[in-house]
């Protein structure tokens, strides 16, 4: 069964450590624009909400891509991006109901969570447990 990341927006303090460690892990530097997780502030409700890939059973992002640049791994459920086939049309970004896919034209690249090969750095560094990894609905 696939491991997934559960988001608990009630616990999120908006510290954005998850964004920082994500880019440090993937890019070797701290640049939240390149994070595969993004924390959105909801000022009216006084809450922060991390947005990260939820590995949908039927991923709208994959189905929306006219170039076939996105695919889903059968076993893990992770979304893979073939950057060479991506044209930057943003169909996947618009189709994602979780706001979990980002495209940065400056870098001409799609960013989506790959769970750090099964050991998500963001979960390890989330001290308030706004992010938890689980399998079949049971936190690990």
Image (tube, rainbow, N blue to C red):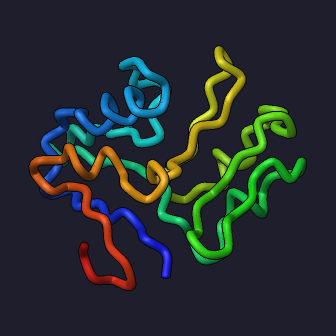
| Residue 13, placed above or below residue 71 | above
At a point 68% along the width and 29% down the height, the residue shown is 109
Observer-nearest of 125 and 58: 125
For residue 2, side relative to residue 111 (left or right): left
Observer-nearest of 47 and 109: 109
For residue 32, side relative to residue 123 (left or right): right
Q: Position of residue 53 (x, y in %)?
A: 49, 56
At a point 31% along the width and 28% down the height, the residue shown is 20
Residue 137 figure quarter: bottom left
At a point 41% along the width and 67% down the height, the residue shown is 4
Q: Position of residue 15 (x, y in %)?
A: 17, 33
Q: Residue furthest top?
A: 106
| Residue 62, placed above or below residue 46 | below
Residue 130 figure quarter: bottom left
Observer-nearest of 119 and 71: 119
| Residue 2, placed above or below residue 61 | below
Q: Quadrant of the C terminus?
A: bottom left
At a point 23% along the width and 44% down the height, the residue shown is 48
Q: Position of residue 19 (x, y in %)?
A: 34, 34
Image label count: 0
| Residue 13, placed above or below residue 19 | below
For residue 55, side relative to residue 74 (left or right): left
């Amino acid at each position: 069964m696939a491991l997934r990341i559960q988001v608990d927006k009630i616990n999120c303090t908006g510290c954005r450590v998850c964004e920082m460690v994500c880019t440090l892990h993937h890019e070797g530097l701290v640049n939240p624009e390149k994070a595969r997780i993004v924390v959105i502030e909801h000022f009216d409700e006084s809450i922060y909400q991390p947005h990260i890939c939820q590995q949908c059973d039927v991923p709208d992002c994959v189905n929306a891509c006219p170039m076939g640049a996105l695919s889903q791994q059968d076993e893990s459920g992770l979304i893979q991006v073939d950057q060479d086939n991506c044209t930057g049309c943003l169909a996947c970004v618009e189709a994602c109901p979780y706001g979990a896919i980002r495209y940065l034209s400056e870098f001409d690249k799609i960013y989506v969570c790959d769970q750090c090969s099964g050991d998500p750095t963001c979960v390890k560094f989330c001290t308030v447990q706004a992010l938890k990894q689980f399998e079949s609905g049971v936190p690990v």
